[in-house]
Amino acid sequence: MHWISRFYDAHWQVTAGQSISYREIVGNAFGLASALFGLRRSVWAWPVGIVGNVLLFTVFVGTAAGAEQATTPLYGQAARQVFFVVTSVYGWWRWRQSRHSGGGPAVHPRWASPGERLVLGAGAAVALVACFYVFRAVGAGFPVPWWYYLADSWIFVGSIAATYAMARGWVDFWLCWIAVDLVGVPELLHFRYYPSAVLYAVYAGFVIWGFLVWLRISRRERPQRRSVEPALGTA
């Protein structure tokens, strides 16, 4: 359709040599809306986030293919949108199952167990090393320093770990996002992805707030879960 084509090509001209795709702005807006729904433990966090992922994928993959403005192609940023969609489908299914089986909120936050943290941390460490070498091989010959591939790998792996932890309802997922933001904001500013950098900066404050909210919920609902368990065992 004509309006889709116009939206796809539309850019906001910031300066004579710098423009921003409307898709990047709108995609990040959907990302922020998804985070707000997640804070409220609403299933809508997942479908809204998927829309944002699709829009941002077209932005980052376009730069990697040379179709967008000539900025540094962030391969990890593009690839993680695909994994976001896959993980979001899983989270959407899991939260819907939880809401339909127990009623009320779609998820009851809790801390990950030591074993769950060990598995997630070990998997993330292996994935980080693997992504570093893969991204560096894909971008061989591109004039960027080695830390670019490490930062992109960190953002990629950390984002997937955070999304998976959110799907499981772990309070830890907010801490994963903080680790991603600490690297993501400087990287995006350095390579002039300004809307995404601003969103990451907003996330930094929002994530701290979300962490405190989920932490309070996990403490408040924990006694309720313990009081229910004996009743279920004697039924």
Image: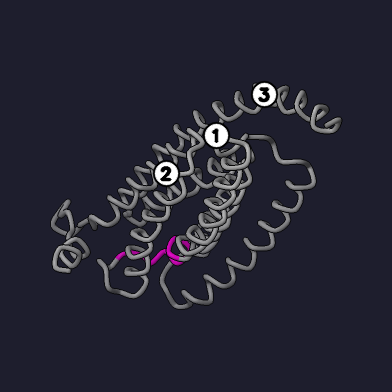
The percent position of residue 123, horizontal first and vertical second, equals: 70, 58
Which amino acid, by three-letter code, is at mark 1? Pro
Of helix, strand and loop, which one carries label 3? helix
- Up-down relation of residue 210 to residue 143 (above or below): above
Q: Is residue 72 magenta?
A: yes
Q: Which amino acid does label 3 sit on?
A: Arg
Examine the image and state in which quarter residue 228 appears: top right
Comparing 224 with 24, the one in front is 224
Viewport quadrant of the C terminus: top right
Per the image, the residue denoted by label 1 is 105
| Pointer 1 or 2: first along the chain | 2
- CA neighbours of label 2 inside 10 A, class few (<14), some (14 to 19), many (20+): many
Which-is-in-front pick, marks 1 and 2?
A: 1
Residue topped by disc 3: 219
Residue, x 79% and y 47% (percent of image)? Answer: 115
In the image, residue 21 lies at what x, y percent? 24, 58
Please report whichever mark, 3 or 2, sits nearer to the chain's N-terminal start: 2
Residue for badge 2: 34
Q: How crowded is mark 1: few (under 14 residues within 10 Å), some or many (20 or more)?
A: some
Neighbourhood count class around disc 3 (C-alpha, 10 Å): few under 14, some 14–19, many 20 upward: few
Per the model, the C-alpha gap separating discs 1 and 2 is: 16 Å
Q: Which span of residues is magenta-colored?
A: 71-78
Find out whether the residues at labels 3 and 1 contact each other: C-beta distance under 8 Å: no
Discs 3, 2 touching: Cβ within 8 Å: no
